[in-house]
Amino acid sequence: MKGKKLAMRSAFLLGVSMALAACSASEHDGTFAVPAAQPVTAAKKAQDRPPNIIVILTDDQGYADVGFNGSTEIPTPNIDRIAKEGVRFDRGYVSFPVCGPSRAGLLTGRYQSRFGYDLNASENPHDPTAGLPLSERTIADILHQAGYTSAALGKWHMGNHDQFHPFERGFDEFYGFPNGGHNYFLDRLRNIPIKEAKNGGQLYESWLMVGREQVATSGYLTDWLSERAVEFVERHKEKPFFLYLAYNAPHTPMQATQKYLDRFRHIADERRRTYAAMVSAVDDGVGVLLDRLDTLGLADDTIVFFLSDNGGPLVRARNGSVNLPLRGGKGDLFEGGVRVPFAMRWTGRIPAGVNYPHSVSSLDIAATAAGVNGISIPAGNALDGVNLIPYLTGAKKGEAPHRQLFWRYPADTRDNLRIGRRAAIDGNDKLVEYKRDQSLFDLSKDIGEQKNLRGDRKQRTHELDAAWQRWNDQMAKRSAIAIYNEWEGS
Ligand SMILES: [Ca+2]
């Protein structure tokens, strides 16, 4: 029986690899071609007003589990529209391989290590140090000065204390939950005030928040969030808006409605089947949202990002995701932990149907939002990302947005100098260190990080190590937050 299971698993993995190989040979051939006909009218129209910005973030979705990265088992035609009508990032990275720090980086546009957010924060609702430090500004804060209306939908995870509420961080509307995850069947939730929650399980079961209030809701969480997203866009169609649509799908618990499960009867493994259903529900929501942008005539005026907050988990919180051909998953600094499905669309302004070969980062989202509005950032909150638009379509086309990217993952302590794992990318070369064991990989030839070149390229290994040390010297030496294992309810 076990042998048969393994054989099936191998056949499945081979299928994924073949699908990816086929994909890279045809649709994504590495070229960066600008379509001949740029719709000038659309470009002109878009310049008349600041663009709306939508960030669609999924939670723990595998690199291989979107159509635009080659998945045929889980069709995502609507998410794929973003890549087809815009840019698929071949090397799209997040700044950390688990939820909290990754989101802290994305929302601020800064390496979260700069402000000591190096691990998931404690979920203690009474701890004023358990969340995104108040010294930091979010994308919503940045866009507020340009007159945007902003909404946070879904998973917040930037602190359960009142002072970390999205309304205190630049957002005007909030529909979701403040902690790091949630149950999906809304009719089964309970009236547990966040402040009275004794543990993570109670937070997962608590009523959702609308604004600052917790209210009874019904339906399926993913659908509910998609409906709120469409309503928000409808209500704010006349003026620039920022929508941060942070689905908690397909993060555990594995819960899907029959409507979505029925699409995947052919998947024998129950976890994988439920995962596929949860991704499919997100895809339906993305479809409704993109359709609404079309009907409202806003597609040309709206930048849409899609990405996952980290790689698919293969061990803890395993959800049935696949990151192949990447090595590792959530929690790893191998590509499977930090290289995610990532696409961007700005119809008429950036090229369409392009496979972008250079490294980009989730840190670039805030910088792009600031850049398209000409907003300058105070030195104390200087961004680590770059405005991607000139790289995709303007004077910097052909240049790489980032020569280098860095990661660090401390041991489970507030001492950030006790590094458990770290990584640096410089061009195609990547240094990865686990417990002082270093590896050097050439990502241009070895996407799966199988061949350690450290022995052959000692000088290069040393250069990346030194670059990482220089970066690390600028980062916080101590955690500025209470960390996840410091609450008795963890
Ligand atoms: Ca996550």
Image (spheres, rainbow, N blue to C red):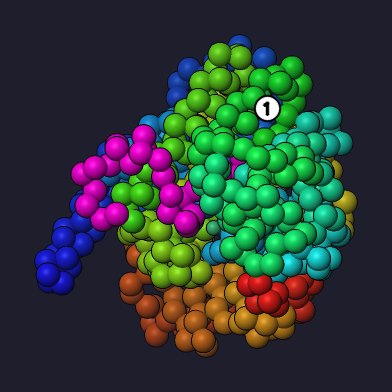
Numbered-mark total: 1
Question: Is the CB of mark 1 within 8 Å of ligand 1?
Answer: no
Residue type at mark 1? Phe
Please name the residue shown 62% across and 38% down the image. Answer: 217
Ligand 1 shown in quarter: bottom right
Q: Which residues are the magenta region?
A: 244-270
Can residue 262 be found in the magenta stretch?
yes
Q: Position of residue 306 (x, y in %)?
A: 53, 41
Q: Is residue 236 above or below residue 247?
A: above
Q: Please report the residue visible at 65 percent of the width from the left and 67 percent of the height from the top.
A: 199
**Considering depth in this image, is 102 or 127 the residue closer to the camera?**
127
Q: Would residue 363 be found to the left or right of residue 64 on screen?
A: right
Picture coordinates of residue 301, whole percent (x, y) = 65, 22
Is residue 300 placed above or below 129 in the rendered structure? Answer: above
Viewer-nearest residue: 375 or 229:
229
In the rendered image, which quarter contains the C terminus? bottom right
**Place of residue 80 in the rendered image (x, y in percent of width and height, measured from the top left):** 42, 34
Please provide percent x and percent y for residue 101: 65, 63
Label 1: element kind: helix
Image vertical order of residue 367 relative to residue 380, above or below: above
Is residue 232 among the parts visible in the rendering?
Answer: yes
* Quarter of the image where one finds residue 73: top left
Quadrant where the N terminus sits is: bottom left
Q: Residue at x 50, y 25 (%)?
A: 288
Question: Label 1: how many residues lie within 10 Å, few (<14), some (14-19) or many (20+)?
Answer: some
Can you identify the residue that label 1 sits on?
232
Q: Is residue 429 above or below residue 105?
A: below
